[in-house]
Image (cartoon, rainbow, N blue to C red):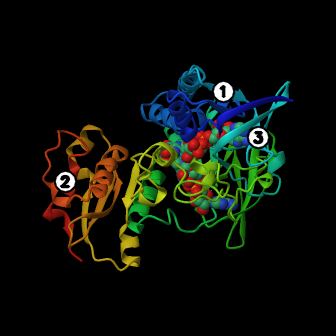
């Protein structure tokens, strides 16, 4: 077996891993990064996640035809994939190894390669960045169903399905409903949960649901899925609500019921790395696993699954191994998030419901998106903005922005929260005009405070 010794081995070409590989190489350190599929150079985000999905979403909003948008998506991904490969492979002290990694011990990793003998890599330090993969709930008949796909399969289609049935109304379920509605598909969303967007305030969830319904989505919430079978070119889902059975016919079925840490076949049982009950790699606030030479970064260690949290994991490693050791998971602060539907739904910090559950004192500010001049310019006036402020410190406790471009505007509020700025600073700040961010002036004005 071919053997290789290297100081740093990174398993998985994700956001954290590739950024770390580049940084190590720039320091002149020997680093090898192993990736199981050339299709995935650069990881989930650029190949099968954020970037292709947002490309399809944006082109759908612009009114492009699905076939054209699909082609643009392929070209964009190919370009980014090659760029990511060369970003690492062209560094003199870095090596990209094609193959699937499996631990033999805390320091030894076997890499199986297609059409070539396996390779054994011995490394001083190992960074696991293997991401997450779609959870496939067990549904009777699903393995024989030819129209059942995950988000990856759906984005590979050349032709839009006439009727898309989506199982799951979380991030992927909602973003893909909005996306395919914009291309003219009929969309039905089924979720086992009765409450729509359970972590959002009820007024926000109701708005989102109503807007998606107006765009054509049909929601079937609180349904159990009993089985699926093919009939000619279509597939039929058997579902029940309160014991009442019904059938739904679909051209494609998207499974979007969550993603779980990718540790399958990684051989962690041969190491001293400990795994949590739900299958994530256990790490401390410095991302150290229970093996002293092994770290885990990104989706694989559980917690929020975002590209920007994976990037922040890289920053933690950099700070711990080469910096002032100040950066950890514990001082990450509030994370903003956005669901890229139309308009976008963004959150940071507490929702009103969470503030109430925590018995916090808060001042509530509320603004209809119709009041924002830029929303009229953009011809997208749907939405509602909410923000909570601590009455004593005047700091922002949280915000929910359901409005066009809220994925940009939310970052202003997350920065303000991190900097502990009083809300008055945002209220009185001079923003350029006409922009969606200037709505923050109005949102925080006294006139828009909701007296409880
Ligand atoms: C459809 C979709 C849309 C998304 N949209 C967004 C978004 O808009 N914004 C956002 O922030 N997040 C989004 N996400 C989530 C985001 O993509 C992930 O959280 C992020 O990419 C995780 O990065 P990572 O660094 O953990 O690893 P990944 O980027 O997942 O990389 C892991 C890599 O490891 C490889 N690998 C796995 N096992 C092995 C092995 N044994 N040997 C060798 N290689 C291996 C995999 O092939 C993969 O390339 C989306 C996800 C999906 C699926
Ligand atoms: N904009 C973004 O940042 C973005 C976009 C896409 C994905 N992501 C990341 O990817 C992760 C995975 O997304 P996701 O949408 O797959 O998961 P999710 O956890 O967001 O939503 C899963 C949904 O599936 C439902 N569900 C679970 N099991 C079910 C079953 N058996 N039958 C019917 N419904 C069922 C749940 O009730 C939930 O509504 C997200 O947590 C997110 O971190 C982020």
- Asked where in the image residue 163 lies, by quadrant, the reply is top right
Q: Residues within 10 Å of mark 2 (few under 14, many from 20)?
A: many
Q: Is residue 240 above or below residue 427?
A: below
Q: Quadrant of the C terminus?
A: bottom left
| Residue found at the far bottom of this picture | 359
Q: Which mark is residue 109?
A: 3
Which numbered circle lies on residue 96?
A: 1
- Camera-side residue: 54 or 177? 54
Q: Is mark 3 within 8 Å of ligand 1?
A: no
- Please determine whether, in this image, residue 151 is positioned above or below residue 246: above
Up the image or down, 247 lies above or below 77; here it is: below
* Earlier sequence position, callout 3 versus callout 1: 1
Residues at badges 3 and 2 in contact (C-beta under 8 Å)? no
Quadrant assignment, res 380: top left
Please name the residue shown 53% across and 27% down the image.
Answer: 28
Identify the residue position indicated by label 2 in the image: 426
Disc 2 secondary structure class: helix
Q: Is residue 227 left or right of residue 290?
A: right
Question: For the residues marked 3 and 2, what is the alpha-carbon distance in whole angstroms?
Answer: 51 Å
Give the label, 3 or 1, closer to the camera: 3
Judge by depth and name the residue closer to the eye, 289 or 203.
289
Which is closer to the viewer, label 2 or label 1? 1
Q: Position of residue 58 (x, y in %)?
A: 45, 34
Instruction: Label 3: state its secondary structure.
Output: strand
Q: Can you see residue 147?
A: no
Where's residue 439, x and y in %? Answer: 22, 50
Report the front residue among 410 and 216.
Answer: 410
């Amino acid at each position: 077996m071919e053997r290789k010794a290297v100081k740093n081995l990174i398993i998985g070409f994700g956001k954290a891993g590739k950024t770390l590989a580049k940084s190590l190489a720039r320091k002149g350190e020997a680093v090898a990064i192993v990736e199981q599929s050339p299709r995935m150079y650069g990881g989930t985000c650029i190949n099968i996640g954020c970037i292709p999905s947002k490309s399809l979403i944006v082109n759908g909003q612009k009114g492009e035809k699905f076939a054209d948008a699909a082609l643009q998506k392929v070209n964009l991904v190919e370009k980014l994939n090659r760029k990511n490969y060369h970003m690492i492979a062209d560094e003199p002290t870095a090596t990209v190894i094609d193959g699937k990694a499996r631990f033999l011990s805390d320091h030894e990793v076997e890499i199986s390669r297609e059409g070539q003998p396996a390779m054994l890599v011995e490394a001083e330090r190992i960074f696991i960045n293997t991401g997450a993969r779609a959870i496939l709930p067990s549904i009777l008949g699903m393995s024989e169903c030819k129209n059942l796909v995950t988000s990856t399969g759906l984005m590979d289609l050349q032709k839009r399905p006439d009727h898309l049935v989506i199982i799951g109304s979380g991030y992927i379920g909602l973003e893909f409903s909005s996306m395919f509605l914009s291309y003219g598909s009929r969309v039905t969303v089924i979720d086992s949960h009765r409450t729509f967007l359970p972590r959002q305030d009820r007024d926000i969830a109701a708005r989102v649901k109503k807007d998606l319904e107006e765009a054509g989505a049909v929601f079937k919430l609180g349904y159990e899925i009993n089985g699926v079978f093919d009939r000619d070119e279509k597939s039929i889902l058997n579902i029940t609500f309160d014991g009442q059975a019904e059938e739904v016919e679909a051209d494609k079925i998207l499974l979007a019921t969550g993603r779980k840490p990718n540790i399958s076949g990684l051989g962690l049982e041969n190491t001293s790395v400990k795994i949590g009950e739900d299958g994530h790699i256990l790490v401390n606030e410095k991302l150290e696993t229970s093996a002293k030479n092994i770290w885990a970064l990104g989706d694989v260690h559980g917690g929020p699954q975002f590209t920007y949290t994976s990037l922040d994991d890289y920053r933690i490693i950099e700070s711990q191994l080469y910096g002032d050791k100040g950066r950890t998971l514990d001082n990450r602060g509030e994370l903003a998030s956005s669901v890229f539907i139309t308009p976008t739904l963004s959150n940071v910090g507490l929702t009103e419901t969470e503030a109430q559950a925590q018995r916090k004192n808060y001042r509530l500010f509320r603004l209809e998106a119709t009041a924002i001049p830029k929303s009229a310019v953009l011809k997208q006036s749907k939405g509602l903005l909410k923000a909570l402020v601590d009455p004593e410190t005047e700091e922002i406790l949280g915000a929910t922005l359901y409005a066009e471009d809220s994925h940009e505007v939310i970052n202003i509020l997350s920065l303000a929260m991190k900097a502990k700025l009083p809300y008055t600073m945002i209220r009185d700040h001079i923003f350029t005009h006409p922009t969606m961010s200037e709505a923050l002036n109005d949102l925080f004005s006294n006139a828009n405070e909701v007296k409880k």
